[in-house]
Image (spheres, rainbow, N blue to C red):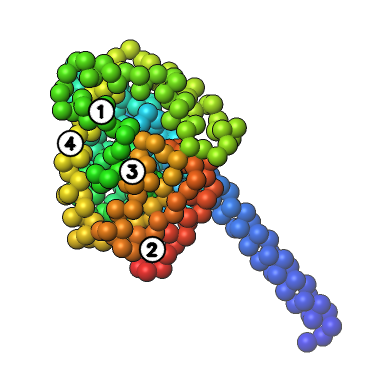
Amino acid sequence: MNSTTKAVVASAIVALAGLSVSTIAQTNEQENIESVESSKVRYGTETINELEIFYREAGTVGQPQLVLLHGFPTSSHMFRDLIEDLGDEFHIIAPDYPGYGMSSAPSTDDYEYSFENTADIVDELFERKGFDDYVLYVMDYGAPVGYRIATEHPERVAGFIVQNGNAYDEGLQDFWNPIKKYWESGSVEDRDALRGLLTLEATKWQYLTGVRDEAVISPDNWLVVQPLLDREGNDDVQLDMFYDYRTNVTLYPTWQKYFRDYQPPMLITWATGDYIFPESGAHPYLRDLPDAQLHLLETGHFALEEDGDEIAQLIRTFVKDLNNED
């Protein structure tokens, strides 16, 4: 090979190498763009039983599935930061129940508000969106909704993240006494006695009680939640749900048997400053699930507001360990 030929070959090799590097760089850049796009929070609705059910979604098909079930009196809004934190690693869905957030809120004359009906609608949403092998994050009202779904479809639940979601009698302490009184009597007087739980003062109390630093709790929370609670007729929605909560308590033994029989992996992140669902409701899980992970957090009812970063990291590690076991 003469010197001219060698020079041509060398130039070709250099050009090909440059093209290869450029192609790899472009591919990596495109993958990064696609990753950023897929992690963005998307908003949608599904019409189920003539109701418009709102949900937040992030991630893509093929990523580990994570379902987020909210508590009272909020909505999927409570998960807004967590979804953004985890959207690049998980396929996430967080619905608003009927009567909450951006979902339809028909009057109590036109729709029966119950935990059974809520679970049925949420379950239908999961099926339509292709969620069939998921970790359930349950908080407050999300626990009875999630446990109803799990006992109906145990094969679909890969594990639980429980944040102040109750399944044991020990977890219903002083806060619940006036609600239990209403369960027993069903009287208008005892129903009306609970209306104070629907005020702005009560909503702020839920967000601020038990936290380490009130200054880090965004007032946007109650500015979003309270106007929805104050909608005409929504007080009766919430009072009906208070009354129907008694049906969850009768299912506690069923859910506990499900835990014992199926031994689902469970990460418990429990806020110790929560007066509604106090720490006494966390420890009984370990009776039925001795391998469950229990992390006590020194914060209030809505633990994500103060300890969202810590909870997000615990979720990453928990799900990674689940996948490694598989």
Give the residue furthest to the bottom.
1
In front of the other: label 1 or label 2? 1
Q: Secondary structure at mark 3?
A: loop
**Looking at this view, is 136 or 44 the one in front?**
136
Please identify the quadrant where the C terminus is shown. bottom left
Q: Position of residue 60 (x, y in %)?
A: 43, 49
Q: Is residue 45 visible?
A: no
Identity of the residue drawn at 66% across and 66% down: 20
Q: Which residue is mark 2?
A: 322
Q: Which kind of residue does numbered mark 2 sit on?
A: Leu
> How many angstroms separate mark 2 from mark 4 (CA)?
32 Å
Q: Which kind of residue does numbered mark 3 sit on?
A: Gly
Q: Which residue is mark 4?
A: 247
Q: Which residue is mark 3?
A: 165
The mark nearer the N terminus, 1 or 4, is 1
Q: Position of residue 304 (x, y in %)?
A: 48, 41
The mark nearer the N terminus, 3 or 1, is 3
